Amino acid sequence: MHKKYSLVIIYLFAFVISSLAQEKAKPIFKNGEAQIVEAFNTPNKWIRHDLWVETTFDTDGDGKLDRMHTSVTRPYQTDTEGLKLPVIYVSSPYFAGVAQGGSEIFWDVKHELGDTPKPHIHPEVTRIGKRPIISNSHIKKWVPRGYIVVHSSSPGTGLSQGAPTIGGNNESLAPKAVIDWLNGRVKAYTEAYGNTEVKAFWCTGKVGMTGTSYNGTIPLAAATTGVEGLEAIIPIAPNTSYYHYYRSNGLVRSPGGYLGEDVDVLYDFIHSGDESKRTYNNAKVRDTEIKNGIDRITGDYNDFWAERDYLNEMKPMKAALLMSHGFNDWNVMPEHSYRIYKKAKDMGLPTQIYYHQNGHGGPPPITMMNRWFTRYLHGIKNNVENDAKAWIVRENDKASEPTPYKDYPNPDASPITLYLSSGGAQKGGLTTRNLHNQGKEMLVDNYNFDGATLAKSKSSKHRLLYTTPILKEDIHISGTARISIKLASSKPAANLSVWLVSLPWNEGKIKITDNIITRGWADPQNHKSLRKSKPLKPGKFYELAFDLMPDDQIIKAGQQIGLMIFSSDKEFTLHPKPGTELTIDLDGTRLELPMVGGVDAFNKSMKE
């Protein structure tokens, strides 16, 4: 080959190599999802730093605007190559540790309804927060896919200033401030009380939020402010209303697994902030605002609870919403996500909902989350807004393999009305036929018997049980069941608990939660108003109606659906002394059950 041509080839080769070497790293997308980019998958080169974002409030009374401790994890190319990326942001009250203690830190649930409860111990949190890394959650999942991950501690926790308020306004405004900083609208500093500013020059201004439980509540709280730049949220098992978490239709009710917990207990549990500010915070928030608002005597809904119900705050919300929840989550119950999903859908926001059959927590599959964030943070038109609205993990399926549906509840479901027939001390009937003249039946309250024991008992004076015939075919329940009940109490106050169960109770053969279709609780004193309870006149009958928890479940052939009515629920309600009598008027009581195929499907399942 001629020498001149050889030199040309060498120069061209060198130019190509040089160009490849100078090519900047950038996100890569395939099938509508952000892919792992090897240039970003370099944890030892990630830039990690922390800072304090200034808010618009002062809740710890020091005369200075509270600042939120915030940390950043980003690819090094955001420094070396001028790369700007969207942010996935997680905020939590738990990052710096929580209070320790036994049952003494909870309210004592053994007292008569309407009585003033005994005081309980208020523990202190030993703070474990460190700099500059607040948390390592989510970084391995999202940074390699072309995102920056930001964490912050919520007010009054860790190195964040202020006071926890358990759903108060500052817990919405704090993440808003961080998002405002990411968009260049507010200031942040290198130190808690310093003046050296930090700029988010590496952020595109597009932010998504996610998290589980309390960490899932905060994305919704931020979204209700309507903050510009928060494009999408994926709350996982979020508490969307503290009333619905600690009360139920006027009844004082604990979240599953935390008998005797209330707002003040949770306040103590997370209050890991500056020790020198705790006395002020306790006096102002816990011992005044919370103490005067929670009302463990009546359980009524009031302004304190209304402020902590995010459904009431949704008007400014613009973020695309993907909800995730478990149908057998008896801690943060499945109504929490459904009520927000329904409202967001009615508002015309992009929405999807993912439900699984397990308990607390459980994110959507990574593919769903990836498509959601890819669409709304990177702006890739992957058509996610036209995907199925609802994704339900069917019984015994993998969480990563949900079944798509047009919506939730299933659009093919319609309510059927089931009536009661006598015999509830053993096993009465539950049928679509209104038999009339079924009379009245009585149960005696006794919290010593838990719900599972009562459901499995062949007979009991402490519950009434009404069942369908044995199903000849599978039936599909989808939506929210509703109970209308007519009752009388022997005392001025009584707990009311309702379970819908699948029988026989297959303990050991399938998961125990499969036997519990759904549950609900109510205070008969609130039969007219959630905001105003009124003592019952012993022996007088009252009518009330309330929803049970939403569900989507296939009840297999060979099972029976059972409606169980009892008084105190050992796992959830207060424990008054046994002996209160509840009398149920069967003719004035009915169950509305949402069923795919409606009454025709139910009747078909009854035939030989």
Image (cartoon, grey):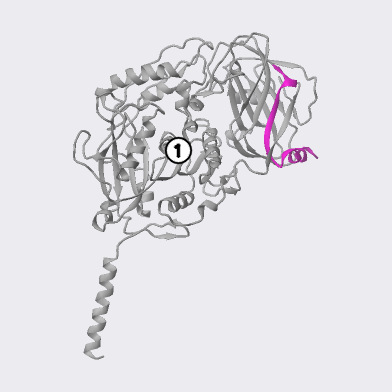
Give residue 50's position: percent from left, percent from top: 25, 41
Q: Secondary structure at mark 1?
A: loop
Q: Nearer the viewer, residue 235 or 347?
A: 347
Place residue 463 in its image quadrant: top right
The quadrant the N terminus occupies is: bottom left
Reading the image, the residue beneath label 1 is: 316
Horizontally, is 311 left or right of 278 in the view? right
Q: In the depicted view, which residue is nearer to us: 43 or 199?
A: 199
Which residue is located at x 48 percent, y 22 percent? 259
The disc labelled 1 sits on which kind of residue?
Answer: Pro
Residue depicted at x 45% and y 38%: 316
Residue 215: horizontal and vertical position, in percent? 41, 36
Residue stretch rendered in magenta on the structure: 584-608
Q: Quadrant of residue 164?
A: top left
Q: Is residue 261 visible?
A: no
**Image quadrant in which the C terminus is located:** top right
Quarter of the figure with residue 263: top left
Q: Residue at x 44, y 17 (%)?
A: 107
Visible residue check, residue 428: yes
Residue in the picture at 24% in, 75% down: 14
Residue sitting nearer the eye, 158 or 244: 244
Locate residue 483, reporting x and y percent.
66, 26
Q: Is residue 404 one of those drawn in magenta?
A: no
